[in-house]
Structures are given as C-alpha cells and as structure tokens.
Image (cartoon, rainbow, N blue to C red):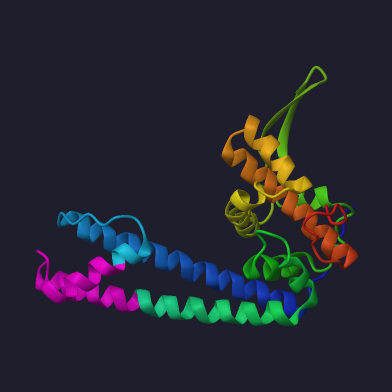
C-alpha cells in the first residue's frame, strides 16, 4: 500500500489560495479575450500583449474610434473589471511573496532557476518536506512529467508524458522551465551542458519538459536534504 502524508492546515490554506488565484487569472484571460473579440467585430485588430490591448481601450475611451457609445461604455466597464482583477491577483502575489520569505523550505526552493514564489509555495503546500517520495523521479512521475511506455516483445517505446497528478503544479513548473531555459542553456555548468546537448537533438518543447522534470527532482533533493541550490555543483542534482 502507498500511504499519503496528511497535510497541515497551513498547507491546505496555501493550496486554497493558489486555486483562487488560478481562477482569477482564468477570469482575467477570458475577459481580455472577450474584449479583443468585441473590438475585432468592429474591425479593430489589436496586437498581442496586455499593454497593446490596454492602450487600444484607453484610446477608444477618449475618441470613440468607430465604436458606438453603448459598446464604449460596456468596454469601459469591462476595463474596470480587468483592473479590479489585476488588483486582487497582485494582492495574492504579495501574500505568496511574504509566505516564501517566512518559510525556510520555500526560500530554499526559490534559489532554483525557474522556481519562483508561486512554484515554491505551491510545491511546499503539496509535498511538504518531500518525504512522501523515496526519490526525485517519483515526484516527477507524480507530477506527470515522465514519458509513458509502450513495451511490446521486450522492446520499450517511450511516448509523451503521462500528464498525471496536479495539472496546476505541472503547469507552473513547465512555465518556470520555459522561462529559465534560455539563460540556463548558456551557463558553463553541468546543467547547461546537458541542456545544450538536448537542444541539439530534440525539439524545444521536449527540452522544456525535460528541464521541468529535472527541476522537480532538484526541488525534491533540496527539501529532503534541507540545502540550497548550487549552480555549478552536483549536490542537489
């Protein structure tokens, strides 16, 4: 039997905060997409980016720009909702930053490239000190970051990642790996050399997932050994 460690009340509270923040981010994304579609129906094409959309909405509020007064009022109201969501998300981000500063485990995780405040607090809330897992690969498998296998006639064939476990945690770690990949691949470290070798023979998205799995294993090692990340060392990898 595989036993799961009980979470503390503090861990459960942090997970609730993460779920609420993720819902607010989804609402903000849906709202901005709807605003873009309203403008597109009026022949106004806005380039990608939050700043571009905000500038277009501010310009419409001042001169109309071919949009009727009723639709302009509606867009102004939606812009107010957007700003209110931004304020709520920023307040939660500040709360997570305070948690990461006051929690030794989260501070250690934040020393890993690609593991920011959100990743660190979410990981600590989900796995605690990591003792539920006997090795780092078990954590990667729990997050769904390892490839599925199809074995026929004793010949294993690796497929895509399993995508098991927490979708939210996996998303955070993959996003962090994608952000850290360009800088890490240029470093004269064992991790940088490993990434350069992967980039020379695999697709970029495959390398991002491989790096995410590596970061999860490093995070497990730091939690179990209570050490900080050393960029050029092999202690945490």
For the image shown, how many numbered marks are present on the structure?
0
Q: Residue furthest top?
A: 153
User: Please, is residue 174 above or below residue 65 in the view?
Assistant: above
Residue 55 on the magenta span: yes
User: Please, is residue 82 above or below residue 168 in the view?
Assistant: below
The residue shown at (74%, 41%) is 194
The residue shown at (62%, 74%) is 16
Residue 95, located in which quarter of the rendered image?
A: bottom right
Where residue 114 appears, x then y in whole percent?
A: 65, 59
User: Please, is residue 129 above or below residue 235 in the view?
Assistant: below
Where residue 73 appears, x then y in whole percent?
A: 18, 76
Give the extent of the magenta segment: 54-81
The residue shown at (11%, 70%) is 64
Where residue 60 appears, x then y in whole percent?
A: 17, 70
Asked if residue 183 lies left or right of residue 46, the reply is right
Q: Nearer the viewer, residue 113 or 66?
A: 113
């Amino acid at each position: 039997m595989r036993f799961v460690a009980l979470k503390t009340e503090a861990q459960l509270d942090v997970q609730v905060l993460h779920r609420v923040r993720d819902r607010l981010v989804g609402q903000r994304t849906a709202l901005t997409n709807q605003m873009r579609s309203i403008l597109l129906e009026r022949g106004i094409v806005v380039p990608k980016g939050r700043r571009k959309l905000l500038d277009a909405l501010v310009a419409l509020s001042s001169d109309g720009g071919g949009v009727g007064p009723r639709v302009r009022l509606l867009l102004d109201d939606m812009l107010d909702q957007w700003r209110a969501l931004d304020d709520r998300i920023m307040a939660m981000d500040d709360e997570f930053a305070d948690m990461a500063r006051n929690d030794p485990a989260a501070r250690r995780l934040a020393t890993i490239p690609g593991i920011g405040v959100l990743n660190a607090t979410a990981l600590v809330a989900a796995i605690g000190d990591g003792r539920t897992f006997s090795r780092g690969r078990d954590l990667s498998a729990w997050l769904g970051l390892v490839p599925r296998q199809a074995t026929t006639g004793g010949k294993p064939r690796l497929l895509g990642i399993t995508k098991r476990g927490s979708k939210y945690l996996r998303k955070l770690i993959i996003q962090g790996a994608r952000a850290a990949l360009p800088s890490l691949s240029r470093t004269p470290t064992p991790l940088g050399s490993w990434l350069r070798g992967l980039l020379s023979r695999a697709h970029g998205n495959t390398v991002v997932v491989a790096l995410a799995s590596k970061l999860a294993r490093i995070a497990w090692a730091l939690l179990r050994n209570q050490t900080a990340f050393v960029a050029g060392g092999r202690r945490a990898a």
